[in-house]
Amino acid sequence: MRCPDCNKFVSYDEPQVEIQSVDIDGEGATVHVEVTVTLPCTDCNTELKSASIEAEASFEHTCKPKAERPPEQKPSPDYKDDDDQFEADDSGEAQGTSRLETKDRHGKQIKLARYMKTFYGFELDAEVKCLKCGEVFVVRLEGEEQASSFDEC
């Protein structure tokens, strides 16, 4: 792609990731995340392409009896039985990822790099807190898009 600032054909630098939202559904079994992945110019760091990627992950949690909980793990004082049981405690730090698809749809190795597909995405470890028992645990989220589906900035 040609960079509008340095007016050269350039490659992309490492993907930059910005978390837009981390939500837990009302039932408390799924974490939804929306992330913006931006591909900057290698030479001048101008944003060339970006995409909004959504991902979700399911989790299971059962509260331990009070006798088995560590002393620092305490339930939220504002929690009532009708309230949502989980909240996104910390959205964490998302890491940009990139990969090449080196096999075709039949499972054969692609020999020329020209025909390989490039995917950019993110990995995120989101912390979820159970308001009923106070336990904090990590849910892993991943998402990616093919480079050709990114929008030009």
Image: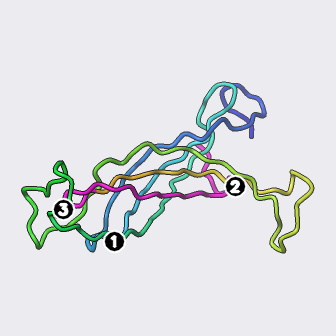
In this rendering, which labeled residue sits more in front, label 3 or label 2? 3
- For the record, the magenta segment spans 129-153
Could you say which is closer to the camera, residue 59 or residue 119? 59
Residue 148 has which mark? 2
Q: Residue 15 location, x and y as percent?
A: 60, 41
Which residue appears at 14% of the width and 64% of the height? 66
Residue type (three-letter) at the residue carrying disc 1: Ala
Q: Alpha-carbon distance for marks 1 and 3? A: 16 Å
Q: Residue 59 location, x and y as percent?
A: 38, 68
- Residue matched to label 1: 29
Q: Alpha-carbon distance for marks 3 and 2? A: 45 Å
Q: Secondary structure at mark 1?
A: loop
In the displayed structure, would residue 41 be above or below residue 37? above
Label 2 CA crowd tier, 10 Å (few <14, some 14–19, many 20+):
few
Which residue appears at 39% of the width and 62% of the height? 32
Compared across the picture, whether 25 is left or right of 121 comes to left
Q: Is residue 152 magenta?
A: yes
Count of marks, rendered view = 3
